[in-house]
Amino acid sequence: MKVGVVAVAVVLALLGFAVAGAVAHGAASGHTDATTVTEPTSSSTTTTSTSTTTTSPTTPGPGLPSIILPDPKITPGRLNPGVRQSTIKKTICKSGWTKTIRPPVSYTNALKIQQMVLYRETDSPSEYEEDHLMPLELGGAPKNPKNLWPEPHSQSKLSDPLETQLKQKVCKGVMKLKKARAAIRLFKNTEG
């Protein structure tokens, strides 16, 4: 799971956050590695710090929710062809746009039940949401089953704020859409 902590650190770095967030994420679970990070603190100075990071075990401990990673055979991800770098002002950066394309709960709930079988998940469906691998906020395909998978609510609490932060960076022009999509894909493929 070392790759997972590295993925979190890469995404956080892309967002301009210190690696401390990745350290905090991994601290709950077990293995440690030292990491040195140099980051600018102002236009003329830099700060170098060494942190100890931890990595999560592949299987969660007793009482911890399971981590469901998108299976690339079932959920490889799909994009909305109408969302490109040249259309972001009319699509993802337009207030309320995702509400206009979000699939109805009746559709996602039915798909969630079908996909829970494919993912061999036996918990109550109410413990999951049908999540977009490529989020609508970054131009993911709304209804394509290849862009949706059953994600535990405990995981979505981590990925949802990241999706919003990436979208904000894209809409402010400080990050390209392609880079934001790569960052969220890396995060979801390693952390869920």
Image: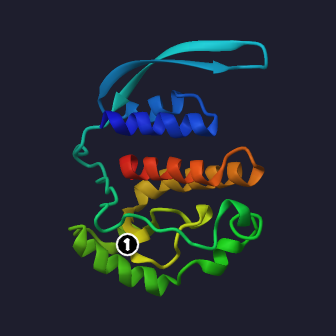
| Circle 1 residue | 126
User: Looking at the image, can residue 46 be seen?
Assistant: yes
As rendered, which of 186 and 105 lies closer to the eye?
186
Q: Position of residue 12 (x, y in %)?
A: 55, 37
Instruction: Give how far across and how far down residue 170 sits, in percent.
Output: 69, 52
- Choose between 87 and 50: the one closer to the eye: 87
Q: Residue at x 25, y 38 (%)?
A: 57
Residue 128 to residue 186: above or below = below
Q: Please say if 116 is above or below 172.
A: below
Query: Is residue 73 shown left or right of residue 144?
Result: left
Percent of width and height locating residue 136: 57, 67
**Colour mode of the rendering:** rainbow
Q: Quadrant of residue 119?
A: bottom left
At x 24%, y 43%, the residue is: 58
Indicate the position of residue 20 as horizontal and vertical percent values.
Answer: 52, 27
Instruction: Please say whether residue 161 is visible from this viewpoint.
Output: no
Q: Is residue 44 left or right of residue 137?
A: right
Q: Identify the image quadrant of the N terminus.
A: top left
Question: SS for tag 1?
Answer: helix
| Total numbered circles | 1
Q: Is residue 163 above or below residue 49?
A: below
- The residue lying at 62 percent from left, 50 percent from top is 166
The quarter of the picture where residue 6 lies is top left
Seen in the picture, residue 40 relative to 128 is either above or below; the reply is above
The reply, left or right, for residue 73 in relation to residue 17 is left
Question: Of the residues shown, which amino acid type is indicated by label 1?
Answer: Ser
Toward the bottom, the furthest residue is 106
Mark 1 surroundings: few (<14), some (14-19) or many (≥20) residues within 10 A? few
Identify the residue shown where x is 60% and y is 61%: 138
**Side of 134 where 83 appears, left or right:** right
